[in-house]
Image (cartoon, rainbow, N blue to C red):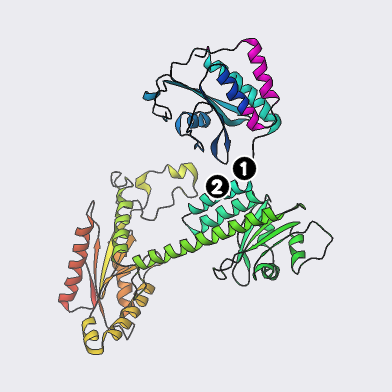
Amino acid sequence: MPSGALPPSAEETSTRAVATAADATQACRAVADLLLQAGYSLPSVYLERGGRLRCLAVHGYRQLFDGIAPGVGVIGRTYTTGQATVVRDAGADGAYRQAVEAVVDEICVPVRGDGRTLGAINVEGVEPLPAGTLELLETLADALSARLAELGLPQESAAQRLVRHATGLAEARTADELAQRSLAAAVDLGPLSSAAIVGDRPCRVLAARGPLAPALRELPPAALDAAVAWVEAGGSSRTSPEPDGFALAGQQEFRQAGAETLVLIGTPGIGDEVTALLVADASPAPVGPEVVESLELLAALATAHLRSLRATERLQQQASTDALTGLPHRRGFHEALAAALSGVRGSGAREAGVRGSGVRGSGARGTGGREAGRRRLDDLPAREVAVVMIDLDGFKVVNDSHGHAAGDALLQHAAEVLSGALRSSDDLYRLGGDEFASVLDVPDAGEAVAVAGRLLAAVRQDATLGSISLGVAVARPDEPPPTLLARADAALYVVKNRGKDGLHLAT
């Protein structure tokens, strides 16, 4: 059983083993060996690499935890907080991750250096760990930190960095997010200071990062077109180690922009929108085939994920859009209505004596600073949610007399006319058949009626559409969507019963 302390001779020997280790891995092993010699049967040493804690030395485990995420388990918590963790009843500690069933105690200390936490030294015990264990671990952490300051931390290989970035690319949910993650990965893999994504015809910089980003964005399209031509037939291009050699067409503009080192990776197969990945640096830096290979793999991974995102976007659009008119359909309408009502009710404005907070925001926190953000709710303009239900009069007659093709053409034209008559902040939805609807954010019922009047006037001015009937309803306090819709629909049928071609506001 460990004593929690070492004889002076053993401590001197162990400290020397850490201090003379040839690399970071050997220094970690020296720490684990010392703890084993001191009677600790389950020691381990972890260092951060690539955002994960990697086990560089261990004794006593057949199966161990590796690649620990910051904050996970006792080791991850110690790393994240930078504070030692002493667990005297492993089973009762919520952060404890069981590796050995018989473990009773666990003590973990951070390894710090260069103003940050580098890793952790951990011991577990199947019997209570003795007094003095914490002090011993802290002494070893200091020795390891001192040696790491001299040696530097172990670096990820290019393959390890690529795999890490591949995981990040796969987590991107939008094309913009994918572009930013791809640029960050390209700079890391280079390692060069700046990166850009080139696309469109004529070419332009779609996204860029790094100190050269402003200059790269200002490059003329002709220079970008010429550079893309280097790689669009396949392959890649990189700066030669001979600075006085012949330049490719268009290269001079990149040097004038400050890019002394330039790597260009073609991204074929996804059309003209994205055509190349560009990585650059202001200093002449040798770039070998290994770096180019990593960047090529990165570009291939990003391209594959972009295709996946595009396919997902198309499926989502098909699922939420009416195929005939291109308008969002019934599901989108109900989601928009629920969001609008939630936006008004969730603001607390009703409790302050205000009818609504503004579905699209009043801008109180936009540019006015803290004082504007503290304005009383009842100083904000009152907002209401209104629904407009729209029905094409006589549509069935068109279908029956002229066929469904004529009816479809009429629906498409009606969608264009009605959408054009709405305010820029409003959306039109097709609910089915000849029924359309819109959700409005208005200051009062008068504005809702005015918007409906614009729709009515637009149809009356179009000789091909005949007429429409409209029902308008403004949401009451805490009114559920079905009740609001029923009132708007009832208002529409008031118009129908009066002879059509008009609008009615539900009271």
Disc 2 marks which residue? 164
Relative to 69, is 301 above or below?
below
Q: Was residue 434 drawn as part of the magenta stretch in this picture? A: no
The chief SS type of the magenta part is helix
> Residue 402's spot in the image, x, y percent?
26, 89
Q: Secondary structure at mark 1?
A: loop
- From this viewpoint, which residue is outermost toward the left? 497
Distance between the alpha carbons at the discs numbered 1 and 2 = 10 Å
Q: Tell me residue 273's x, y (percent).
A: 56, 68
The residue positioned 61% from the left and 27% from the top of the image is: 29
Picture disc at residue 308: none
Q: Give the residue displayed 52% in from the left and 50% down from the top.
A: 168
User: Magenta stretch?
Assistant: 1-28
Depth check: give the residue in front, 328 or 233: 233
Q: Are marks 1 and 2 in contact (CB under 8 Å)?
A: yes
Q: Amino acid at mark 1?
A: Glu
**Residue placed most toward the observer, 474 or 174:** 174
**Which quadrant holds residue 223?**
bottom right
Residue 46 place in picture, x, y as percent? 56, 31
Residue 440 relative to residue 289: left or right: left
Quarter assignment of residue 358 = bottom left
Residue 156 disc label: 1
Residue 259 seen from this side: no
